[in-house]
Every structure is written in structure tokens, then in C-alpha cells.
Amino acid sequence: SQQGEEDPQALSIQEGENATMNCSYKTSINNLQWYRQNSGRGLVHLILIRSNEREKHSGRLRVTLDTSKKSSSLLITASRAADTASYFCATVRTGFQKLVFGTGTRLLVSP
Amino acid sequence: GAVVSQHPSWVICKSGTSVKIECRSLDFQATTMFWYRQFPKQSLMLMATSNEGSKATYEQGVEKDKFLINHASLTLSTLTVTSAHPEDSSFYICSAREQGASFYEQYFGPGTRLTVT
């Protein structure tokens, strides 16, 4: 399977703490995206990082990409209870026109 | 902008019946729509890609006669689960690509939860 793996599968933290989740993939990619999914809802796009980029920021989000290790990380700083959701990475495999989603990390931020 | 809706948001049907799920792009024209399936606490798996006016392209292992996809207009795609069985119970999510955008720039609908009894 070309599906990516994310770890941890679940993460529980307190408000104000930082949350880091990782995504590993298997093939060469054009870009990698991170999405958030609230329980029982659709996906919200968070950030896209291209294969020639190493780091990207958006508000409290910081994404890194290491193509040599085929991995990416998403850091959420100063987390809030509203950040509670599942987070998925999605890759675009070179030469293919479809998104391949990782297994997801379920984040719980307690007040 | 870039809103995608799905209808219904949840549906319960009896085994053996068919159910239709609609996916609409509300404020843009969607050249391509994608249908995903998600089991509880699992990832999204692409089922098929549909381009307006042409037949859908199904992923390996997805039964095209069971999951009928129609993309008759630039704002509407439908997924019909035919002769549904309990194992078809799942969360179905569609996404849409705006005309002229890259295929990975997809806007996702809120999902439809299907329960087959």
C-alpha cells in the first residue's frame, strides 16, 4: 500500500502545550498537504508544502518536509481545545493525479 | 467561497435497497469530483474520480457496478450505492476540483454517513 503512516495515532495534551505529529510516506512526491477533520465532518485544508520546500508556517502551524527521509511533521503551537480533531497528511505521488492520505493522528486538547 | 455540500448528511437504509448521495459545488464549477470512503477512525480511501460529462475512473478494488457515479453537470456529482449491504456502511466524502485548478487543490464536502441495516 502506498498509504502514508502517521504517528502518534493519538495524542492527548493540555491547552497551551505544543502538539507535534509526524507523517511518513513511501514514494517520491510533488507536494504534501495537511488536513484537519473534526469528528464526523469533512476535511479542512491546513497547509501545503512543495517537495522543494523544507519548512512552512501558517499562523500557529509549522510544517517541515524532509524528502530524503520521506517524512513531514506538523507542529501546532499553543494548542487550544478547538484544535481537537483528527489530522491527516496527504501526498501527491509523482506522476499520479490523486491524493493519498495518511492514517491520521487523533489530537485531544483538554482545557 | 469554494463550498462543497453533500446531501443527505446521514442516511439509514435497508439491506438490498439503493441509496443516492449528492455532492454539489455551491459557488464554483467543478471539472472533477472525487469520492472517498472512510471507515471509523481510519483514513480516507479514494474510490473514484469523475470528470464532468465522462465516465468515472474507479480505483482498484472498487466495484463500479455497485458504486455508480454520475457527474452530469459542473456542479453536481452523485454516488449511488446499489443493493446496499451492511458492509457498505461507512462515511462517504466527496471533494471537488475547481475548473483550472490543480487536481490536488480539492475542496471537501462535509460527508455522508451511510448505515445499512
Image (cartoon, coloured by chain):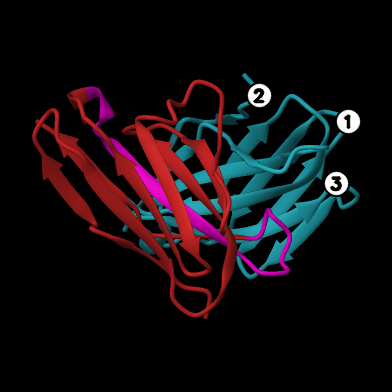
Chain colours: A cyan, B red
Q: CA distance from mark 1 to mark 2?
A: 17 Å
* Residue A95 left/right relative to B18: right
Q: Label 1 lies in what chain?
A: A
Q: Which residue is mark 2?
A: A2
Dot 1 falls on a residue whose secondary structure is loop
| Of residues A14 and A2, the one drawn nearer to the viewer in this rendering | A2
Foreground: disc 1 or disc 2: 2
**Which numbered circle lies on residue B108?**
none
Whether residue B51 is visible: yes
Name the residue beneath numbered marker 3. A51
* Image coordinates for residue B74, horizontal then vertical, percent: 53, 68
Relative to A90, residue B106 above or below:
below
Q: Is residue A7 magenta?
A: no
Q: Which residue is mark 1?
A: A68
* Sequence-first tag of 1 and 2: 2
Residue A20 position (above or below residue A1): below
Q: Are marks 1 and 2 on the same chain?
A: yes
Gap between marks 3 and 2 measured at Cα: 17 Å
- Label 3 crowd bin: few (<14), some (14–19), many (20+), radius 10 Å: some
Callout 2, which amino acid? Answer: Gln
Q: Looking at the picture, do discs 3 and 2 lie on one chain?
A: yes
Where is residue B57 drawn, in percent x and y?
Answer: 58, 38
Element on which disc 3 rests: loop
Magenta stretch? Answer: B87-105
Identify the subunit bearing mark 3.
A
Q: Would residue B88 be counted in the magenta stretch? A: yes
- Foreground: B87 or A55? B87
